[in-house]
Amino acid sequence: MKNSSKKKFPGKNNKEYKRNSDFRYYSNNTNRLDRNEKLLNNSSKDKNDENSNKNNKNNTFSSLKRRKPLLNSNTEFPNKNLEIHQEFTNRRNFDDWIWGKHSVFEALNNERAINRIWCTSEIFSSDKFYTLLKELKSKGVLIEEVSWNRLSQLTYGASHQGVALQLASSKTISLEKLIGSSKHNCANPIILALDGITDPHNLGAIIRSAEAFDCKGIIIPQRRSAGLTGTVAKVAAGALEHLQVSRVVNLNRALDELKNNGFLIVGLSGNSQLSISNFLEKSPLVVVVGSEDKGISLLTQKKCDFLLSIPLKGKTSSLNASVAAAISLFHLAIK
């Protein structure tokens, strides 16, 4: 094997290398002379431009000095987003939420008042939960089957184990119990049925007015309605403790059952020609109040025996749903 350290460079000690080195020395000197001549010719021009560019350079340097480094902005941005997300999470109130298999199962067994349940398909089909969830669904509790990722979004990454629920501020009763209790010691009871009231503040205000005018109960559908949350209880200002609420799976079927038990169904509609002040029927009544934007649905309107309007004398074309409910209950309760 040859020793690589003794490798010789060809031509380094011969005449050709000397001739080449002399040529490179000459060419390098020539290039230097050319560059020096150009520098001398342009020196006067550079001196003139130097003063004019001096202020610009200083301004540029000062602006760059004031500018924040790009790296810092990139590293601070995600931290800022994280702080905003954490602040939003902390502001959300989870006091009425329960999640986790064991915690939820105990709440279901102890018959806690429940507003809504979210669960994965595995939880709903398990032997441990299936019977309890099916019974609650028949009583009007809203149960939603969601994906694991969706449930993680709702609970903001909590260890939910596939199930979570939101407690209600008051227990609900069945429609049969509401009908029976409303007729107890009252010849012409009034029950309020809500169609599409999704704002909890409106629902709380309606409950407060209903209790004040001796309404015997409120019916709210399972879907397209606000539940009995803490916000509703707060706006109701204690009235929820003295008013019975029935949450039904289907509002129209509930109205049919009320008709079969001797109730007249009257709906509030701004397009009706019959004024509520001219309505003189004396009978057990169900007053249907619809949402502010859509009113009572067309199918529910067909279930009504009468459609009543509240006469307005001003330029305002409609009323808030809770205000309309209060005015109608006042007229119907004193007749």
Image: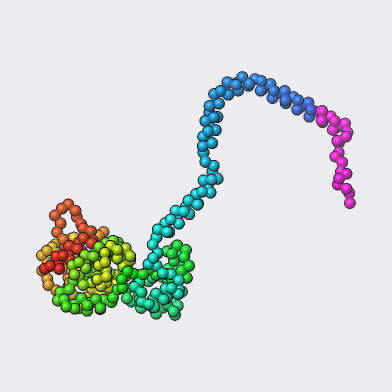
Taking 261 as reference, is 120 left or right?
A: right
Residue 103, position as x, y percentages in the image = 43, 73
Taking 135 as reference, is 218 left or right?
A: left
Residue at the extreme front of the image, as rendered: 238
Colouring method of the image: rainbow
Q: How many circles with numbers are drawn on the protein?
A: 0
Residue 178, position as x, y percentages in the image = 24, 76
Residue 109, position as x, y percentages in the image = 39, 78
Residue 296, position as x, y percentages in the image = 24, 64
The quarter holding residue 92 reads: bottom left
> Is residue 71 visible in the rendered structure shown here?
yes
Closest to the observer: 202 or 10? 202
Q: Quadrant of the C terminus?
A: bottom left
Taking 18 as reference, is 287 left or right?
A: left
Residue drawn at x 21%, y 58% as measured from the top left: 319
> Is residue 301 visible in the rendered structure shown here?
no
Residue drawn at x 26%, y 64% as measured from the top left: 237
Figure check: 59 above or below 150: above
The quarter holding residue 210 reads: bottom left
For the record, the magenta segment spans 1-23
Magenta span contains residue 67: no
Magenta span contains residue 16: yes
Closest to the observer: 195 or 163? 163
Taking 154 as reference, is 37 left or right?
A: right
Residue drawn at x 47%, y 70% as measured from the top left: 161
Residue drawn at x 87%, y 41% as measured from the top left: 8
